[in-house]
Image: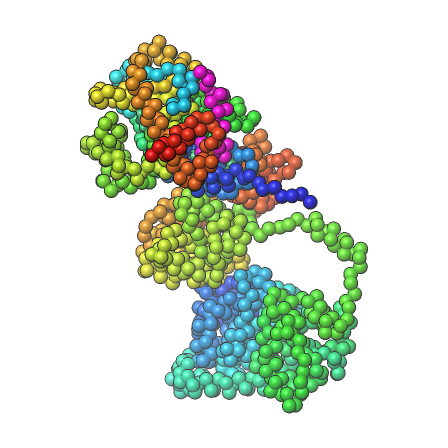
């Protein structure tokens, strides 16, 4: 008689470890791979039971265990690594040169300008960005030209299951090479695909040529955000943009009829639960990561600039090309800005670790993180020493 | 010409239900009404088939209670009428039946109940013999096909003799098996419908048809039942076969007589055991019983399902103790025989071997071996919806919508083919945890929906079929709407009473007699009570799921989704494919991550098969009904569909 081995059913474990534990970021990495997982109103839903082991859904999810060290070695040069913000080949302030392009963008339009360039130069054939969806709040969208790119510029702070769209595209011939604009969790999921992809999928994942990461403090849960807007008589369709101006501690919602301001403390409620367990504020697993410049006293000036971290050679080449083609204005960023950035990154890491330990009940169980990972260990040590000194 | 109209003296192969129908014709009935339900449906169907020749009015009524009311009206007007239903139907009819037996009847009225021991096509194996006892009406139980006809005919005379309803009970093995019957004469009918009601209130033949004065009429009713007892004492339908001095007396009725006879011949006990086969089982004739109980001290009662006859016999035997002495009884009460499920000759023989302490000749070893070998290769067949069944698509939509909604909503199931969703959870994709009587799903949903104040924050759904909607759902639906029960109510309208063989119902423009009649629209009824109504095609998965999720999310009272798609076996669809579907093996992902056999593992249309060697899905063209739904679910678009040529 054979001894029954307890099967590790990927979908089941994903449900238990991620969905039911409140760790699901809504990134969409487990969606679109198969008929079993779908996203509905930013919730990841399992429609029917799957009984496979070693499934992609579990492997790609950014909130299941990952050998981060292996991933770093795979993607980055060892010399570029920093514990706070990951790999860095360069750190700059930047903005799109074209003022027309800048009209609709979040900050400096760096992201949109880079994607436009990559498409134009044939580095990629399809760009996956995020687009407002009447029913779902935000969802991934495949675009092939600059009109669509520009139309969908600007940040929407609700969760976007962008990776699901990549899953549906990969392997389709007409998609060609693909570039993705991704928040931190989405970038991690895309990176995990490179690490874990099964043999027959490797070709498909090789189509992924570029990941532009967005800095990410947190994202809003769609339902809660929509409810709040509803309570304040703000029609979702009327929202043209949103931002958190430096030094103001509030979220500004821009609509056709004016700006509405919400204190960040009031917005806490709307933050997706999973974001409290995320250690990554700079999309560490992207080729280039872009955020608000957010430096100095002149916000009105600086809000039209980005800061960016160039992480890979591919990223470096793209920036060089952008400068050469004159689409980006790039300047060295001051060291204080980098220090500020790192400080904020450490804050997020520490807070997340604390939340993880609170959830698991033990510093030895870090849920999706490995307590032996050198970077994790570093912040874990800090945390424990902080606690002691208090 | 229908064989039902065969001339007198002809020997005809009738199925039990046809024999009953012929008996009714020989009795000269004018009206027949019923509600379809296996194993009863053929009686009304066959009568409808000869309605024109025999000048009958035959109808499929909206439910059994109304059927009995329709039949009773004929009786009140002096005509003979038959009312046919399955055992569950008697429960539905019982409210009226209770009052009807109290008011009495005029023209012969026979209530035929075809019951289903073993619940072969029912969700219970309930008995209506107890209704006969409770309502104090005569009960007849034929044990062969000739008797089925003859007893039915006689039942009308009996009904007229006592001015009350007579119940005739059949079971699946009687109704659906066939045997030779010698036909009697078909009468020339002369009766005219005439309803007098100006006579004395105590005269049910001329006065008003009411149950009052209750006590006086009850006493009269019981007196008449005594007359029946006297008739049963002499009835040729109660027979004894066996030795003059048996070591054991079997008392039995109905199909159980056949099981008992066969068991005796299996064990070669014919010379040692006698059988008293009773066809008139209530009121039990005491003198007759006394005569045969005296023959021996060991009595076994063989019946289906509960110890109804056994109880009656024991009560009589106790009363006769002084004359007949003590007896040892074998039956259900002492667990010699099971009081659940169908009986068969094997079970009866098993009981006899214990009583007689004998061994049965065991089967030859070689034979048993062959049997085991054969059993191993018989493919395990699961109960499921047919290929192309719209219910599969409907439950697929419901299941997905419930998952998307995310609040663990559930479905209150109901009676029809779609009951399978509750009986075999994988068939309903684990959506349907309750199943009771017709219409009860909607009533339950109405109740569940009011539990929100006690913390039940989930969407509540109910389903019902088109025929069930008319049968018993409407009051529950009105209840839900009026009490603001927030439910999503799905009518699976497959254009007929599919489960029992496509009898028409009030939603269709045809009657049992194939006349054109006004159709009563479900959507119009729902709208009239103020419910929100949307009609969709269950095969359109995207549209249907969307309506369902919207309904579940919407606060309100009753939201009705009518899913319209004819049954795959319906006469207009049978054999006609809309699409030819095929699996493109190059695209099929099979059991690898990315699909994991969605079509054959989860969706499970019986026409979709899994090729274990190729590890690809395939379509069995013979079984496939060509609905094209599998095309819509395949994540790879590996299932292709093209318009069928044979359309
Ligand atoms: C949820 C979220 C949180 C953020 N948190 C911070 C932060 O804390 N600090 C900081 O400096 N910057 C943060 N950013 C990044 C910042 O808002 C800008 O996106 C970034 O500075 C790039 O600006 P840009 O002018 O180059 O962008 P644009 O050129 O306007 O391009 C923005 C791109 O982001 C995509 N996008 C919009 N919304 C989403 C979304 N919800 N998910 C994924 N992609 C989206 C758009 O499709 C577009 O391609 C956040 C962004 C998001 C979406
Ligand atoms: S990704 Fe693979 S393992 Fe996961 S649910 Fe889908 S088919 Fe199953
Ligand atoms: S975090 Fe992403 S991959 Fe993981 S369960 Fe949620 S949506 Fe799926
Ligand atoms: S088309 Fe597909 S779902 Fe419909 S009957 Fe044929 S195999 Fe079954
Ligand atoms: S659903 Fe499609 S891909 Fe999956 S096994 Fe069936 S035919 Fe193949």
Which residue is at 48% across, 69% downward? B91
Give how far across and how far down residue A182 sits, in percent: 39, 26
**Residue A9 percent across, percent down from the top left:** 54, 39
- Is residue A332 visible in this depiction of the protein? yes
Residue A64 drawn in magenta = yes
| Residue B451 placement, left or right of B570 | left
Number of numbered discs overlaid on the protein picture:
0
Q: Tell me if residue A195 is in the magenta stretch.
A: no
Residue B405, image quadrant: top left
Where is B603 relative to A371, above or below? below
Q: Residue furthest front?
A: A389
Of residue B540 and residue A143, the one placed in the foreground of this image is: A143
* Residue found at x 77% / y 54%: B369
Camera-side residue: B313 or B609?
B313
Measured as percent of width and height from the top left, residue B496 is found at 48, 56
Judged left or right of residue A94, residue B140 is right
Question: Principal SS element in the magenta part?
Answer: helix
Chain part drawn in magenta: A57-79
User: What residue is rendered at 27% in x and 22% in y?
Assistant: A294
User: Which quadrant, please, contains the N terminus of chain B?
Assistant: bottom right
Asked if one can make out residue B277 in the rendered structure from this viewpoint, the answer is no
Q: To which quarter of the image does residue B253 belong?
A: bottom right
């Amino acid at each position: 008689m054979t001894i029954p081995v307890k099967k590790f059913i990927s979908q089941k474990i994903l449900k238990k470890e991620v969905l039911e534990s409140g760790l699901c970021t809504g990134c969409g990495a487990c969606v679109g791979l198969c008929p079993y997982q779908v996203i509905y109103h930013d919730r990841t839903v399992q429609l029917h039971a799957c009984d496979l082991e070693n499934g992609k859904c579990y492997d790609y999810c950014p909130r299941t265990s990952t050998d981060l060290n292996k991933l770093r070695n795979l993607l980055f040069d060892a010399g570029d690594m920093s514990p706070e913000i990951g790999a860095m080949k360069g750190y700059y302030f930047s903005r799109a040169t074209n003022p027309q392009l800048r009209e609709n963008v979040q900050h400096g339009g760096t992201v949109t300008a880079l994607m436009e360039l990559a498409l134009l130069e044939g580095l990629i054939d399809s760009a996956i960005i995020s687009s407002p969806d009447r029913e779902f709040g935000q969802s991934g969208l495949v675009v092939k030209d600059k009109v669509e790119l520009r139309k969908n510029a600007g940040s929407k702070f609700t969760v976007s299951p962008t990776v699901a769209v990549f899953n549906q595209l990969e392997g389709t011939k007409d998609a060609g090479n693909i570039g993705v604009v991704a928040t931190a969790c989405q970038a991690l999921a895309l990176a995990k695909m490179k690490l874990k992809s099964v043999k027959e999928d490797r070709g498909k994942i090789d189509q992924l040529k570029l990941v532009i990461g967005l800095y990410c403090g947190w994202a809003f849960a769609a339902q809660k955000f929509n409810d709040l807007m509803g309570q304040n008589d703000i029609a979702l369709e009327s929202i043209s943009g949103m931002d958190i101006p430096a030094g103001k501690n509030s979220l500004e919602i821009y609509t056709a009829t004016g700006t509405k301001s919400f204190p960040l403390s009031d917005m806490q409620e709307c933050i997706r639960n999973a974001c409290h367990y995320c250690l990554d504020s700079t999309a560490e697993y992207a080729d280039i990561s872009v955020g608000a410049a957010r430096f100095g006293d002149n916000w009105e000036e600086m809000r039209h600039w980005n800061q960016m971290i160039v992480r890979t050679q591919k990223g470096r080449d793209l920036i060089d090309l952008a400068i050469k083609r004159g689409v980006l204005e790039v300047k060295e960023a001051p060291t204080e800005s980098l220090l500020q950035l790192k400080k904020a990154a450490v804050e997020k890491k520490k807070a997340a670790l604390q939340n993880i330990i609170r959830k698991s009940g033990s510093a030895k169980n870090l849920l999706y993180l490995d307590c032996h990972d050198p970077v994790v260990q570093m912040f874990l040590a800090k945390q424990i020493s902080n606690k002691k000194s208090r | 010409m229908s064989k039902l109209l065969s001339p007198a003296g002809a020997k005809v192969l009738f199925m039990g239900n046809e024999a009953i129908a012929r008996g009714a014709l020989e009795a000269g009935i004018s009206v027949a009404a019923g509600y379809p339900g296996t194993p009863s449906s053929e009686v009304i169907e066959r009568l409808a088939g000869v309605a024109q020749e025999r000048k009958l009015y035959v109808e499929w009524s909206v439910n059994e209670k109304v059927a009995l009311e329709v039949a009773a009206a004929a009786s009140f007007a002096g005509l003979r009428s038959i009312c046919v239903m399955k055992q569950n139907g008697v429960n539905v009819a019982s409210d009226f039946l209770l009052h009807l037996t109290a008011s009495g009847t005029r023209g012969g009225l026979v209530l035929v109940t075809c019951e289903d021991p073993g619940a072969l096509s029912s969700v219970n194996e309930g008995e209506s013999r107890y209704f006969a006892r409770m309502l104090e009406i005569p009960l007849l139980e034929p044990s062969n096909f000739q008797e089925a006809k003859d007893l039915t005919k006689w039942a009308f005379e009996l009904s007229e003799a006592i001015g009350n309803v007579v119940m005739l009970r059949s079971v699946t093995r009687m109704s659906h098996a066939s045997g030779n019957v010698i036909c009697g004469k078909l009468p020339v009918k002369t009766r005219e419908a005439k309803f007098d009601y100006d006579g004395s209130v105590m005269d049910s033949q001329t006065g008003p048809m009411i149950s009052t004065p209750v006590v006086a009429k009850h006493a009269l009713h019981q007196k008449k039942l005594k007359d029946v007892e006297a008739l049963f004492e002499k009835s040729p339908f109660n027979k004894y076969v066996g030795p003059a001095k048996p070591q054991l007396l079997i008392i039995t009725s109905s199909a159980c007589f056949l099981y008992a006879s066969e068991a005796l011949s299996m064990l070669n006990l014919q010379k040692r055991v006698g059988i008293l086969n009773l066809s008139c089982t209530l009121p039990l004739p005491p003198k007759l019983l006394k005569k045969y109980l005296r023959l021996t001290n060991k009595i076994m009662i063989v019946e289906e399902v509960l110890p109804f006859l056994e109880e009656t016999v024991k009560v009589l035997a106790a009363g006769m103790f002084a004359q007949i002495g003590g007896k040892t009884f074998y039956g259900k009460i002492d667990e010699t025989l099971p009081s659940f499920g169908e009986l068969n000759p094997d079970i009866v023989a098993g009981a006899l071997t214990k009583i007689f302490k004998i061994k049965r000749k065991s089967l030859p070893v070689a034979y048993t071996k062959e049997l085991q070998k054969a059993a191993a290769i018989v493919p395990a067949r699961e109960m499921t919806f047919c290929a192309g069944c719209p219910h599969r698509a409907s439950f697929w939509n419901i299941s997905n919508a419930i998952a998307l909604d995310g609040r663990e909503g559930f479905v209150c199931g109901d009676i029809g083919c779609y009951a399978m969703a509750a009986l075999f959870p994988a068939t309903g994709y684990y959506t349907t945890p309750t199943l009771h009587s017709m219409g009860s799903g909607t009533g339950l949903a109405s109740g569940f929906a009011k539990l929100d104040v006690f913390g039940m924050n989930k969407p509540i759904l109910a389903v019902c079929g088109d025929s069930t909607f008319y049968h018993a759902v409407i009051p529950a639906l009105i209840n839900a709407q009026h009490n603001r029960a927030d439910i999503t109510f799905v009518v699976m309208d497959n254009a007929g009473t599919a489960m029992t063989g496509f009898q028409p119902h009030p939603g269709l423009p045809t009657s049992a007699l194939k006349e054109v009649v006004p159709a009563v629209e479900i959507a119009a009824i729902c709208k009239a009570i103020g419910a929100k109504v949307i009609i969709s095609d269950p095969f359109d998965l995207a549209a249907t799921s969307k309506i369902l999720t919207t309904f579940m999310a919407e606060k309100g009272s009753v939201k009705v989704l009518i899913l319209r798609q004819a049954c795959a076996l319906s006469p207009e669809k049978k054999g006609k494919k809309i699409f030819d579907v095929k699996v493109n093996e190059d695209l099929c992902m099979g059991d690898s991550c990315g699909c994991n056999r969605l079509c054959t593992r989860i969706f499970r249309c019986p026409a979709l098969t899994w090729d274990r060697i190729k590890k690809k899905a395939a379509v069995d063209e013979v079984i496939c009904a060509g609905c094209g739904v599998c095309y819509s679910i395949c994540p790879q678009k590996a299932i292709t569909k093209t318009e069928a040529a044979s359309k």
